[in-house]
Every structure is written in C-alpha cells, then in structure tokens.
C-alpha cells in the first residue's frame, strides 16, 4: 500500500483540485497499473442479506492487503456503502473505488445520494475513484467529489467498436464517423478522457465547473436528472464549498 500524500489546493463546489504527491487531480489512471485489494463482486440489485455478506467478505479479503485501491461495495444500500468505505479507510486505504458505477449511472437518484453520502462521510484526504465512467458524466461526478477515473472505459468501448466523444458514444457500425481498428480506437478514446479531465481541472481552477456540468447535463436524461436531484436534495452539500461573490 503506497502511503502517498494528498493535498487539496482548491475547491469549486464540492469538486477538488489537489495534488496526489506531485500529480494534479482530478486524474486519469491507467487501469492496468492499479493494484486493487481482493473483494467480493456483488451485483447492484440484490437482497440486503446478500449485500451485507458481500461487504463482510470484501472487508475480510481486503484486511492486510498491500494494494493501493479497494472497492466500496454495498449494492444499492447507502448505509452498507458507508460502512464499507469507513472500515476500509480505517484499514489505511485512501483510494476507494465506487463499485457498480455502470449501474449507478443509469440510476441518477441513487448515484447522487450514494456519492454525496460517501464524500461527506470520508476524510478529505481519502480519494474516490471510478473505474467506469461515461465521458459526459465526468464533470458531474467530479462536481460531487470524485477524484480519480480509470481509462478502462476507453479500452472497453474501443473493443466494442464505439467512439467516445465529450458528450456522446458512437457505435461505428452505425455512425461512420471514422475508420479505426480496435487499438487505434482505444487510444482515441483514452485521449478523449484525458482531454475531459484536463478540461475539468481548468474549470475548477477558474471557478466555472458548474457551467461545464450544466452543459454536459444535456447529453442524456440520466445526466440531467442527476443534476436536478443534486440541486433539489443536496443544497447544503453544494453550498458548503461554493464561494459567495
């Protein structure tokens, strides 16, 4: 387990511009280089008893691990997610991956409630990570306190012959936008993710991330719903770090 130092340099709402050792966050990670503690993979929609078992097993398996990253499990149950995250934090993990992100992105209410609860419950120096994020959701995920993103999304979509842009996904079998093999497409998708992360960092630096979040919210009903729920239900969370002019 790498005991790296994280320092928050600037807030724009709950979003954080920081330094992880000498590297600026939000940050895009190489998935292949992530050392992840063993865990019990549990689907999102399961009975509570199974979700509790999954959390217990994940905590047991992660205990004593020297990995840098650990998964926050708990399926759809917010209290189990918080329990899992806090106990992993007590073990010394400071880079926590939110499990079932593909499912959460389709459930905006759950996405907002779980992510904001995790960010409020964890220490400021603990970083939240997503290993699967549609590019258009990266601004709002950062706005809610996500710090790290994996490039696994670029590889997955590249293998499926899908092009990622800042706001859309284009199956190239249907949309003849470009002609690229899987390897080239994965690289193009990764470049898109890198560009978005850089864009998000600059908007935080300039205090304009909210503008970008609203712009990208139009990319899908789920994205727009997440923003509306965030505004309606989490004003205290948003205003805690929002400057007054």
Image: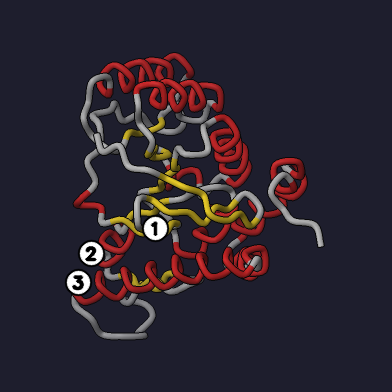
Q: Position of residue 9 (x, y in %)?
A: 53, 54
Rounded to the nearest whole Å, what is the CA distance between mark 1 and mark 3?
24 Å
Q: Quadrant of residue 143?
A: bottom right
Instruction: Relative to 203, say whether 137 is above or below.
Output: above
Whether residue 32 is situated above or below residue 175 in the rendered picture: above
Corner quadrant of residue 64:
top left
List the residue tagged with mark 1.
27
Q: Give the structural element (helix, strand or loop) at label 3.
A: helix
Q: Quadrant of residue 23?
A: bottom left
- Structural crowding at the residue carrying mark 1, measured as other residues with C-alpha within 10 Å and reported as few (<14), some (14–19) or many (≥20): many
Q: Are marks 2 and 3 in contact (CB under 8 Å)?
A: yes
Find residue 206 and report its horizontal and vertical position in percent: 62, 70
Number of residue marks = 3
Residue under the point 63% across and 42% down: 109
Q: Residue 85: where, in percent of width, then height?
A: 45, 27
Residue at 40% across, 21% down: 90
Residue 89 image point, x, y percent: 41, 27
Residue identified by numbered label 3: 182
How crowded pointer 2 is (Cα within 10 Å; few <14, some 14-19, many 20+) is rated as: some
Alpha-carbon distance for marks 1 and 2? 23 Å
- Which circle marks residue 159 in the picture? 2
């Amino acid at each position: 387990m790498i005991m790296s130092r994280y320092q928050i340099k600037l807030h724009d709402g709950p979003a954080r511009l920081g330094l992880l050792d000498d590297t600026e966050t939000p940050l895009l990670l190489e998935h292949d280089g992530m050392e992840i503690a063993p865990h019990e993979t549990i689907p999102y929609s399961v009975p509570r008893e199974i979700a509790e078992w999954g959390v217990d097993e994940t905590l047991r398996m992660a205990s004593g691990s020297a990995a840098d990253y650990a998964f926050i499990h708990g399926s759809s149950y917010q209290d189990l997610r918080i329990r899992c995250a806090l106990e992993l934090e007590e073990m010394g993990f400071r880079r926590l991956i939110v499990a079932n992100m593909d499912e959460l992105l389709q459930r905006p209410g759950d996405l907002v409630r779980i992510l904001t609860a995790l960010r409020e419950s964890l220490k400021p120096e603990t970083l939240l990570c997503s290993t699967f994020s549609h590019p258009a959701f990266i601004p709002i995920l950062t706005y809610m306190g996500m710090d790290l993103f994996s490039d696994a999304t670029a590889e997955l979509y590249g293998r499926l012959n899908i092009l990622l842009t800042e706001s859309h996904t284009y199956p190239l079998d249907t949309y003849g936008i470009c002609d690229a093999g899987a390897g080239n497409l994965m690289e193009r998708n990764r470049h898109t993710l890198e560009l978005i992360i850089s864009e998000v960092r600059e908007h935080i630096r300039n205090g304009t991330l909210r503008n970008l979040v609203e712009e990208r919210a139009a990319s899908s009903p789920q994205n727009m719903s997440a923003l509306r729920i965030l505004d309606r239900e989490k004003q205290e969370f948003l205003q805690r770090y929002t400057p007054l002019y």
